[in-house]
Image (spheres, rainbow, N blue to C red):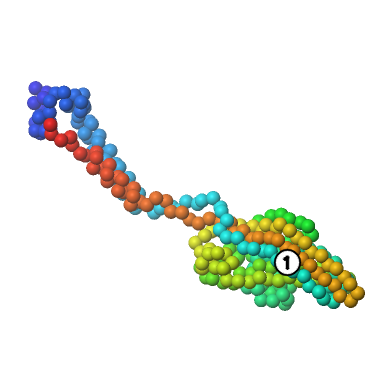
């Protein structure tokens, strides 16, 4: 009698199974009902979760900060001039800048006429080396420089390498230069670092050598400044596509609702 009730409820496919096959499928008709309904409910939940994955936007995942670009800050040179007579070597200033206009007449440190600049307020003494990280907390121009590095417009980027010396009665003076070039060439990325997020900018100084030599009415100034600028940051990385999750859920639905072929 229980088997007759099963036939009327589940149809002819169940009736054609042998008792041994039914035992492999479940422990009884009530067990089969629970198993089949359970599969359907599970499949439905999986499908709903997949649909939610499609609807929800993928949140960006932040990777560890890496070196996005590196710019050389090295420069060597020498000069022979009456202006170097009686000079004493002092220190070096290394800077990364946008909008270099002139060596004088500006409001930046040392009177430089520059729009934005990092490093001009740090003095590297003779024989020194080390690392300094510029960020939004310790550098007033950091956010402006970071914005220009990532605005998607190829602009001129400058690197200052300035050896300072002093003379009795005339105070501090400097020689050296600002090396300027388009960002795509300086950074190795075109148009710039667009799409990246700048965490900090690191100045790595390897060598500071300055030597002043005086003669009767003239003198020489020699320098060798070895340094590099490293731009550290990250770029957003999207999570796995919601469409892929949706496809996986649909496959699970298909497997969960498939019936065993008739014997």
- Residue 137 spot, x, y in % from top left: 64, 57
- Residue nearer the viewer, 172 or 204: 204
- Residue nearer the viewer, 173 or 108: 173
Q: Is residue 172 above or below residue 21?
A: below
Can residue 260 be seen in the rendering of this structure?
A: yes
- Residue nearer the viewer, 138 or 129: 129
In the picture, measured across the screen, residue 225 lies left or right of residue 37, that is right
Q: Residue at x 12, y 28 (%)?
A: 17
- Residue 248 spot, x, y in % from top left: 31, 45
Q: To which quarter of the image does residue 67 belong?
A: bottom right
- Residue nearer the viewer, 111 or 201: 201
Q: Is residue 158 above or below residue 21?
A: below
Quadrant location of the C terminus? top left
In the picture, measured across the screen, residue 152 lies left or right of residue 230, that is left
Can residue 199 be seen in the rendering of this structure?
A: no
Tell me the crowding category of disc 1: few under 14, some 14 to 19, or many 20 or more residues within 10 angstroms, Cα based: some
Q: Which residue is mark 1?
A: 76
Q: Residue at x 34, y 50 (%)?
A: 244
In the picture, measured across the screen, residue 122 lies left or right of residue 24, that is right
SS at badge 1: strand
Q: To which quarter of the image does residue 95 belong?
A: bottom right
- Residue 105 spot, x, y in % from top left: 72, 77
Quadrant location of the N terminus? top left
In the picture, measured across the screen, residue 140 lies left or right of residue 91, that is left
């Amino acid at each position: 009698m229980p088997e007759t009730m099963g036939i009327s409820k589940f149809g002819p496919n169940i009736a054609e199974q042998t008792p041994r096959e039914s035992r492999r499928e479940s422990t009884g008709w009530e067990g089969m009902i629970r198993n089949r309904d359970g599969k359907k409910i599970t499949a439905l939940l999986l499908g709903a979760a997949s649909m939610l994955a499609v609807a929800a936007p993928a949140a960006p995942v932040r990777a560890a900060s890496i070196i996005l670009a590196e710019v050389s800050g090295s420069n060597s040179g020498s000069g022979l001039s009456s202006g170097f007579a009686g000079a004493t070597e002092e220190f070096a200033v290394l800077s990364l800048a946008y909008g270099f206009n002139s060596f004088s007449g500006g409001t930046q440190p040392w009177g430089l006429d520059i729009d934005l600049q990092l490093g001009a307020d740090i003095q590297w003494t003779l024989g020194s080396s080390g690392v300094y990280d510029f960020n939004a907390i310790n550098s007033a121009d950091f956010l402006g420089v970071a914005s220009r590095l990532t605005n998607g417009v190829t602009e001129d980027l400058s690197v200052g390498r300035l050896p300072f010396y002093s003379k009795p009665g005339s105070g501090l003076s400097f020689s050296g230069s600002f090396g300027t070039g388009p960002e795509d060439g300086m950074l190795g990325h075109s148009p710039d670092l667009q799409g990246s997020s700048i965490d900090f900018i690191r100045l790595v100084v390897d060598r500071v050598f300055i030597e002043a030599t005086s003669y009767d009415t003239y003198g020489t100034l020699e320098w060798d400044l070895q340094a590099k600028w490293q731009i550290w940051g990250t770029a957003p990385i999207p999570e796995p596509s919601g469409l892929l999750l949706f496809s996986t859920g649909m496959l699970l639905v298909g497997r969960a609702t498939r019936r065993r072929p008739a014997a």
